[in-house]
Image: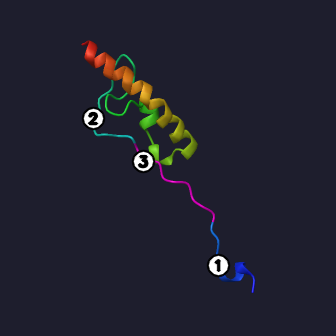
Amino acid sequence: MPLDDIISFTVPQPVSLASPCVNICRMDQNTGWCVGCARTIREISNWSAKPAEERRAILAALPPRKAALAARTKAC
């Protein structure tokens, strides 16, 4: 008996990419980034409907933005 008759194989589904929101929702006027998550309004809007590739690209851009926001906060 072929293995395919016994086991049903499924295609792996992409892992859900959770929103980086930390509920500190205030926009920095100089950068246009949220002080809490470092995303722009355009990046924040409709997060769950964005394709996974777009969400990954946004997530990849956040660490340097967060560092820049932190540096600005320390400078003040």
- Residue lying farthest top? 75
Secondary structure under the numbered disc 3 in the rendered image: loop
Q: With 32 as the anchor, is 4 left or right in this view?
A: right
Indicate the amino acid at tag 1: Ile
Quadrant of residue 74 within the rendered picture: top left
Q: Residue at x 48, y 30 (%)?
A: 61
Q: Earlier in the sequence, mark 3 or mark 2?
A: 3
Q: Residues within 10 Å of mark 2 (few under 14, many from 20)?
A: few
Which residue does the numbered mark 2 point to in the structure image? 24
What is the span of residues highlighted in magenta in the rendered image? Answer: 11-19
- Residue lying farthest right? 2
Q: Residue at x 42, y 30 (%)?
A: 63
Return the x and y of residue 69 as percentages of the image width and height. 34, 22
Indicate the amino acid at tag 2: Ile
| Image depth: mark 1 or mark 3 in front | 1
Which residue does the numbered mark 3 point to in the structure image? 18
Q: Would residue 25 be counted in the magenta stretch?
A: no
Secondary structure under the numbered disc 2 in the rendered image: loop
Identify the mark at residue 7; answer none if there is no mark: 1
Q: With 3 as the anchor, is 38 left or right in this view?
A: left
Spatial CA span between label 2 and label 1: 47 Å
| Image depth: mark 2 or mark 1 in front | 1
For the stretch drawn in magenta, the main secondary structure is loop
